[in-house]
Amino acid sequence: MKTWRDYVRRVVPYTPGEQPNQPGMIKLNTNENPYPPAPGVVKLAEHLETDRFRLYPDPTASVLTEALAEFYHIKQEQVFVGVGSDDVLAMAFQTFFNSDQPIFFPDVTYSFYPVWADAFRIPYETKALDDHFRIRKEDYYADNGGVVFPNPNAPTSVYEDLDFVEDIIKHNRDVLVIVDEAYIDFGGRSALELVEKYDNLLVVQTFSKSRSMAGMRIGYAIGNEELIKALNDFKYSFNSYTMNQTALILGAEAVKDRDYFNQCIEKIIRTRTWAAEELRALGFEFNEPRANFIFATHPKYPARELFEALRKENIYVRYFSLPRIDNYLRITVGTDSEMETLIHFLKDYVK
Amino acid sequence: MKTWRDYVRRVVPYTPGEQPNQPGMIKLNTNENPYPPAPGVVKLAEHLETDRFRLYPDPTASVLTEALAEFYHIKQEQVFVGVGSDDVLAMAFQTFFNSDQPIFFPDVTYSFYPVWADAFRIPYETKALDDHFRIRKEDYYADNGGVVFPNPNAPTSVYEDLDFVEDIIKHNRDVLVIVDEAYIDFGGRSALELVEKYDNLLVVQTFSKSRSMAGMRIGYAIGNEELIKALNDFKYSFNSYTMNQTALILGAEAVKDRDYFNQCIEKIIRTRTWAAEELRALGFEFNEPRANFIFATHPKYPARELFEALRKENIYVRYFSLPRIDNYLRITVGTDSEMETLIHFLKDYVK
């Protein structure tokens, strides 16, 4: 006899990234920002209008889309917001990737792309990065159902310049191209300046990294008004009220302080620069990091061994047991002090 | 030539419910709780750990599932949480409704069911309520791909007793039955006591009504551990971190104060009782309301006309321009004072 079990959706088993919470631990494993959110957010959080909690939030999230439009000097109608960029990307996949042709993305990239494609029954083909972990743009010129790639790429931290990105968009005018810029603020030039020029470009960013708000789950997409309307139409048909009151209010506040935002980014870039030098001096090899993490391998010490050794010291970095990258560590750029502890340990270990 | 437009997902156009925000307005249109969240929530909100905002939330949402498990005296592994019950229901549809047979739900019911079924390409058949807006349970005994219905039903406020609900579950042991109990706390007996007995039963509830937390977007499902695991497996494959820090922490706090919860419900039920009497005295007709709203029609005054007249007075109720119910108003039970204003106006109008 059949039971409900026969109709359960089969999914690729997925375990969320480790979120350890040890006292004194050094957490360099999920690319969080080591600095707190903007002072305005901290202050506003103390005076939340709790009576408003009983009311539904504004489904159009306008306080937040307005703040983002102002920050980027675009129209509010060009901004879509969601529960982290994962939600935004998943919505975009469902809204735009409905061709019978496969969508294209790199073989080494954000691990959720193939998972969403499977979940939404979207055909896909991965395109291998070259031996230096660079995207080969010509791979993306063939007929396809859409293109998505992160820039800088994850988990490689490799950035491609804007001409390179534009070439991919130009060669795909008949489908949607999503440029996933979760890490762009750490030193890259955003494709945002191309959204007026290309109506098939959707740029996705997040509050989780450069804005120190991973805990508030806020992501956004920017594109032409027609794209954003299509996203909203689909989103409203699912769940009109996804962004809660606190995410809307505190998110809008986080965008307002451009100085603090720039200061945090500068600090992280400075730390990344010296930490990269130290790691190179210890024999680690990696591409120039352009995100808030360094993706490094060592010719003598297996990554898994280093990962375990660091973990014993209460230093958490990320290790992926995946083809091509199973000898690499993804090390989030923390504070100077956190990176000093990491490097101090590695200096003893790698000698 | 094809463009990305040719591949945009077609959806039923949907406009989120009106969320007016007029000074002095009386808002009886979206079934929100007229009372603020529990005092513990208000207090805790003043002392949020804002430094934690920079960190990802716990993907297992364990502080919240633990609080709910304690409240309902069940295991934590029997609780799934999501971004409002809309998110929970949408996840459940996708996880469990994968048969080729149509799922069944009432013709007059929560308006999102057919929208999700369309969005997820789930075949469905609606079963007509009888002339008194009651579910006919025998309609649900035929072969199907799953069953979902609210109890009390929306927007009718009609409640069916637990034996009735159990009959539907019993006759559908081979598929999943979702009992959507968004309004059960306002005077019904929950199907929660049946989850140990039936492994095909999923009960869905929300913080948006009885817990005064619509603005925080928290919903949950309770069932046997195997059902909850299947939901989590699917959810993790989409977006591991949907519940933000504030929803987790404040949500857990909201569950702890059983006395406040009971007091608010008692007040709302008392208000509902006298408001219903007053409305009946004015000639309004309706089933016994068992949710935090009254679904009423008047033999002499068309609902749309009343809706417009009330709106001019800054009193917002809900009107649905839909088959069978286009001569009804859905009136949320507000505070005594709000209901007095409403009834005072209607006394003048309906004479």
Image (cartoon, coloured by chain):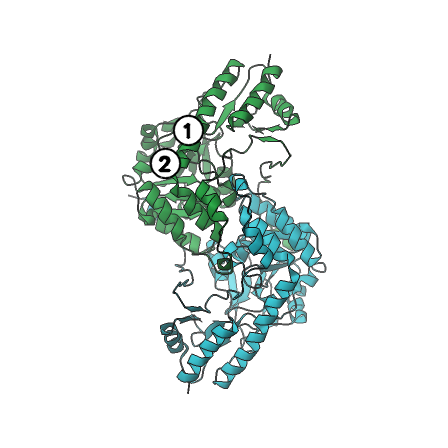
Chain colours: A cyan, B green
Q: Nearer the viewer, residue B125 or B173?
A: B173
Closer to us: A298 or B211: B211
The residue at 63%/47% (across/down) is A62
Mark 2: few/some/many CA within 10 Å (<14, 14-19, 20+): some
In this rendering, the answer to whether A295 lies above or below A259 is below
Picture quarter with the C terminus of chain A: bottom left
Q: Is B48 positioned to the left or the right of A80 in the image? A: left
- Could you tell me residue B49's position as x and y percent? 48, 56
Residue B344 screen position, x and y as percent: 58, 19
* Disc 2 residue type (three-letter): Asp
* Screen quadrant of the N terminus of chain A: top left
Up/down of A111 relative to B293, above or below: below
Q: Determine which residue is flagged by label 2.
A: B143
Q: Quadrant of residue B74?
A: top left
**Residue A8 showing in the rendered view:** no
Instruction: In the rendered structure, find residue B266 and report the number of the disc placed on it.
Output: 1
| Above-or-below relation of B216 to B172 | below
Secondary structure beneath label 2 = loop
Q: Nearer the viewer, residue B46 or A199?
A: B46
The residue positioned 72% from the left and 60% from the top of the image is A197
Picture quadrant of residue A36: bottom right
